[in-house]
Image (tube, rainbow, N blue to C red):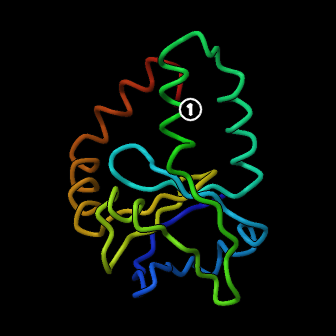
Amino acid sequence: MFLGSYLHSIDSKGRLTVPSKFRPKLATGVVVTRGLDGCLWVFPIDMWKELAEKINNLPTTQKDSRDFARYMFSRASDSVPDKQGRILLPSHLREFANLDGETVILGAQRYLEIWNAAKWKKAEAKLEQEGDTIAERLAEVGLP
């Protein structure tokens, strides 16, 4: 399980060092893709395969299914962390998430999120303000 938040910088070659506690789970490879809310999502390769299978099982006759598959796969990039635990973030993904220099790496249980540090600070402040309301809405669908 990926938990916590960590401040890291992207180097001049577009590489990001993954927090050491996450490296064993990512050692066999990762897929980085556009996430929602303007961040990047980093999936361990086994989790990516599960997600890809679910997306592939969506009905291709539905436009939302085709669009979501395009969104997830068309800009995705696979990588294997190097010996220093760094993964390459291609320029098109860095541009999408406005990543330049300091980033925040968030554990999101089954995957990681990579945020522009300033954007995350704003998103986190909003979450803190709206946390109670979000919890109440989720309680309506059966979450504690």
Query: Residue 80: horizontal and vertical position, in percent?
Result: 70, 72
Q: Residue at x 48, y 26 (%)?
A: 67
Please state which amino acid type lies under the numbered disc 1: Ala
User: Where is residue 31, by image quadrant?
Assistant: bottom right
User: Where is residue 81, by image quadrant?
Assistant: bottom right
Q: Is residue 89 above or below residue 85?
A: above
The crowd level at tag 1 (other Cα within 10 Å; few <14, some 14-19, many 20+) is some
Is residue 33 shown left or right of residue 101?
right
Query: Residue 10: horizontal and vertical position, in percent?
Result: 41, 81
Is residue 60 shown left or right of residue 137?
right
Q: Residue at x 36, y 27 (%)?
A: 136
- Depth check, front residue: 1 or 85: 85
Query: Residue 39: horizontal and vertical position, in percent?
Result: 38, 54
- Depth check, front residue: 123 or 93: 93
Query: In the rendered image, which quarter contains the N terminus?
Result: bottom right
Q: How many marks?
A: 1
Q: Secondary structure at mark 1?
A: helix
Is residue 123 shown left or right of residue 137?
left
Give the residue at mark 1. 69
Q: Residue at x 55, y 21 (%)?
A: 65
Q: Is residue 59 above or below residue 101?
A: above
Q: Residue at x 59, y 10 (%)?
A: 61
Q: Is residue 51 above or below residue 98?
A: above
- Depth check, front residue: 134 or 120: 120
Is residue 13 shown left or right of residue 56?
left
Query: Residue 89: horizontal and vertical position, in percent?
Result: 49, 69
